[in-house]
Image (tube, grey):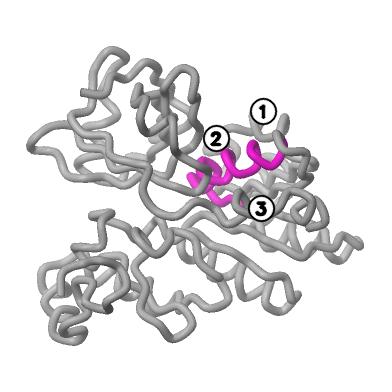
Amino acid sequence: MYPIVKKEKLADRIFLMDVRAPRVAKTCEPGQFVIVKIDEEGERIPLTICDYDRAAGTITIVFQTVGASTERMQYLKEGDAFMDFVGPLGCASELVTMDIEELKKKKIVFIAGGVGTAPVYPQVKWLHAHGVDCDVIMGSRTKELLFFTEQMEKVATNLYVTTDDGSYGFCGMGTDQLQALVDAGRTYNHCVAIGPMIMMKFVCLLTKKLEIPTIVSMNPIMVDGTGMCGACRLTVGGEVKFACVDGPEFDGHLVDFDQAMKRQQLYKTEEGKAMLRLAEGDTHHGGCGHCGGEK
């Protein structure tokens, strides 16, 4: 069992938990994720690691209540425990594998949308700890949905907060803020965008025009987290990939977002799943030969 040592409500329907999982905390890196399961009846929920404390043996997760399982999760209390807490899974951010001196030469901007702030934070924190500067654009629909602004301000070189309705910070979306910064003379040669699928799509459309290489996290489309269910299948540069085992981070300019979003909607219904099985044949459940899923 994996006990919850801290629980906090960050915003409407958004919660933070610190969970004691020493083996996961010992080896995890920014960009990776875990799969949690409340009990025997609960479904497997993939969640990106928001933070970790190796000394305390804890992992921080942030989740938004969007379905039955996350709805149940919000009622867990400090002292309760998850039956399963599996990880670290997926590939770490490419930034943590690069030479530090080369990283310091980069002009990096992160764009976090909504709950995407959670997986952006550990990457920015890691860069700050290693003396690497980066700017962060944090966006949400309203002021009430913002979280982690104080934490992010401590680790970002410059933090720009946006709200769609103008209730706090810059009025507009993250793409609007990025364009405004570029128009004001700021230059970037590396972008990381994490948030809702539609948000990442439009960030990539803009950064492609601006010629800024962009990494996105496809965590929003994951279900099983092991390459077996086929839910997170996507096309990247014309090749079949699975977000949970090949990612979750990919070159955003190569991701077919329209296909991924259409597939994500289809996968929510039994009829849609059947259509996908028919259309994708042997590759539906990982039979691409690259992800380790069943043939």
Q: Is residue 262 above or below residue 147?
A: below
Residue most extreme to the left:
41
Amino acid tagged 1:
Glu
Distance of label 3 from label 1 (alpha carbons): 16 Å
Q: On residue 144, which mark appears?
A: 2
- Helix, strand or loop at label 3? It is strand
Q: State yes or no: residue 112 in magenta.
A: yes
273 relative to 210 in the view: left or right = left
Residue range corresponding to the magenta coloring: 111-128
**What residue is pinned by disc 3?**
110
Counting other residues with Cα less than 10 Å from the Cα at mark 1, is it few (<14), some (14-19), or many (20 or more)?
A: few
Q: State yes or no: residue 59 in magenta.
A: no
Task: Look at 64% across and 46% down and name the residue there.
Answer: 138
Distance of label 2 from label 1 (alpha carbons): 14 Å
Counting other residues with Cα less than 10 Å from the Cα at mark 3, is it few (<14), some (14-19), or many (20 or more)?
A: many
Are discs 2 and 1 less than 8 Å apart at CB? Answer: no
Dot placed on the residue nearer the N-terminal end, 3 or 2: 3
